């Protein structure tokens, strides 16, 4: 298992509490996710309001993630993680209020395409809860910055693989727990209350188990700078750059490869969200799958991803560079989405396996590459900006994905394949760029 190795970084800080935080965070979110559409319907809403509610979280995360990331560079990762998790806990408590309020109509619209759209008071509470969670939802970007702080060049890819695997494990177990709770008399209320308790547990883990890590001070001697160049932690001449600790948007986008890496983050999320928005509709309408079959598909996908991001990635990381693994992972994902566009059961389940392999290799490798941009004092800001670009792509994918599916049907997966193929072509340029930087760094020793 991927948890069998010691969780200690080169700084002496254990990454196990961080993995536990990500696992519990994913667990709390995935518990409510399968039943959110039914909650919206029970409170008087329809598919349009469900799509709108799904886009509220990434819309507010688009605003909050960069600010929280930049703040973590200044005050420390742990403080910001505490604030972020406290916001999640408060959002679930607000969510519970929706069950206590009457379904008072706020406004109603009648449309030809989608029928009547009814917006009630409980739905307004759900919007407020999701907005607050999104605004304080910079925990992933800050956690990635934290992991970058405590990871050495040797274990960087493996650590990010463990982080992704911990989250995927949470996404697998969450719906299982939700199914068991839904069978109880309290129904959906009990599920939301459980999500709140899980958030409270995560808050205690951050406070009591997670060490407070601040960005390391910049060094200015030639010898220390040359040592850093050898390990490709940062690339700069033997003098202190005034922008080394600058976390402004302009300074960050002047970093080499930073605009390209942010663009890749956006394109990856856009391609994935077209898939996540369209596949459930495709499975139920075109393939005539039941909810149990859809759950089996995603369980297989996530299970393969956990295996890849654990033991397999640990072995691959010793033999290949991040850029190479990123390229291969993207190419596998191109094949994955092409298989999904064919109405063949064997190919679709093959696509689930390939998705787990491709994303399991690609995403930790990308995060490892992203963590090398800039200095440690800039990591929170960089991760926050990247997270915002992903949030923007999520908004577009969730709102437009269903519409694109209505136009293209299974052709929407070919659109995802095209996006991933473009990313593959860009990754070739990145491979040569990183290799050139490393060659220049060694020549300066």
Image (cartoon, grey):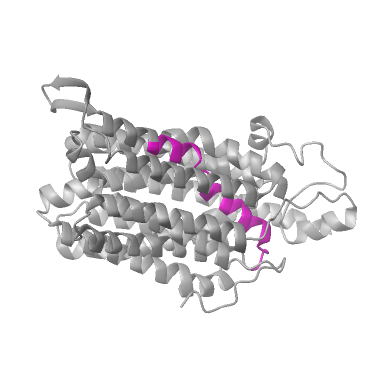
Is 148 part of what is drawn in magenta? yes
Per the rendered image, the range of residues in magenta is 129-154
Residue at image position (60%, 76%) is: 6
Say if 15 sits above or below 367 in the image.
below
Residue 298 lies left or right of residue 8; in this view the side is left
Residue at image position (27%, 43%) is: 277
Residue 233 appears at what percent x and percent y? 71, 55
Say if 112 sits above or below 436 in the image.
above
Give whichever of 5, 256 is nearer the camera. 5
Residue 65 appears at what percent x and percent y? 53, 39
Residue 159 position by quadrant: bottom right
Q: Is residue 326 visible?
A: no
Residue at image position (27%, 59%) is: 178
Residue 250 lies left or right of residue 187; in this view the side is right
* Quadrant, the C terminus: bottom right
Residue 71 appears at what percent x and percent y? 65, 40
Residue at image position (60%, 57%) is: 207
Residue 54 lies left or right of residue 437; in this view the side is left
Main secondary-structure element of the magenta-colored stretch: helix
Give whichever of 387, 432 is nearer the camera. 387
Residue 262 appears at what percent x and percent y? 53, 41
Is 289 part of what is drawn in magenta? no
Marks counted in the figure total 0
Say if 426 sits above or below 349 in the image.
above
Say if 97 sits above or below 200 in the image.
above
Q: Can residue 333 be seen in this view?
A: yes
């Amino acid at each position: 298992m991927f948890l069998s190795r010691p969780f200690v970084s080169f700084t002496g800080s254990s990454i196990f509490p961080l993995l536990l935080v990500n696992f519990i965070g994913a667990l709390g979110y995935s518990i409510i996710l399968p039943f959110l559409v039914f909650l919206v319907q029970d409170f008087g809403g329809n598919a349009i309001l469900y799509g709108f509610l799904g886009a509220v979280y990434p819309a507010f995360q688009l605003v909050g993630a960069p600010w929280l990331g930049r703040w973590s560079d200044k005050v420390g990762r742990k403080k910001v993680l505490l604030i972020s998790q406290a916001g999640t806990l408060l959002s679930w408590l607000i969510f519970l209020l929706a069950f206590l309020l009457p379904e008072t109509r706020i406004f109603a619209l009648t449309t030809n395409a989608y029928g009547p759209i009814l917006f009630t008071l409980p739905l307004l509470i759900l919007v407020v809860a999701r907005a607050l969670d999104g605004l304080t939802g910079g925990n992933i970007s800050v956690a990635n910055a934290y992991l970058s702080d405590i990871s050495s060049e040797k274990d960087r890819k493996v650590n990010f693989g463990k982080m992704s695997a911990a989250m995927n494990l949470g996404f697998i177990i969450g719906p299982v727990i939700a199914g068991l709770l839904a069978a109880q008399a309290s129904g959906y209320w009990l599920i939301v209350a459980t999500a709140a308790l899980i958030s409270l547990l995560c808050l205690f883990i951050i406070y009591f188990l997670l060490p407070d890590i601040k960005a390391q001070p910049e060094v200015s001697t030639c010898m220390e700078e040359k040592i850093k160049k050898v390990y490709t932690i940062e690339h700069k001449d033997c003098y202190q750059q005034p922008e080394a600790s600058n976390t402004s948007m302009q300074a960050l986008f002047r970093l080499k490869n930073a605009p390209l890496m942010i663009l890749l983050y956006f394109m990856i999320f856009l391609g994935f969200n077209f898939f996540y928005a369209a596949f459930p509709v495709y499975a139920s309408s075109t393939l005539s799958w039941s909810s149990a079959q859809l759950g089996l598909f995603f369980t297989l996908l996530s299970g393969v991803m956990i295996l890849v991001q654990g033991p397999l990635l640990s072995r691959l990381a010793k033999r290949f560079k991040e850029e190479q693994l990123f390229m291969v992972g993207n190419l596998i994902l191109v094949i994955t989405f092409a298989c999904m566009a064919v109405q063949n059961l064997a190919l679709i389940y093959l696509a689930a396996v390939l998705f787990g392999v491709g994303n399991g290799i690609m995403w930790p490798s990308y995060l490892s590459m992203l963590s090398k941009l800039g200095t440690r004092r800039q990591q929170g800001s960089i991760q926050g900006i990247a997270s915002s670009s992903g949030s923007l792509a999520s908004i577009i994918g969730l709102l437009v994905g269903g519409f694109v599916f209505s136009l293209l049907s299974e052709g929407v997966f070919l659109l995802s394949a095209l996006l991933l193929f473009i990313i593959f072509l860009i990754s070739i340029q990145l491979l040569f760029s990183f290799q050139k930087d490393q060659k220049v760094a060694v020549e300066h020793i």
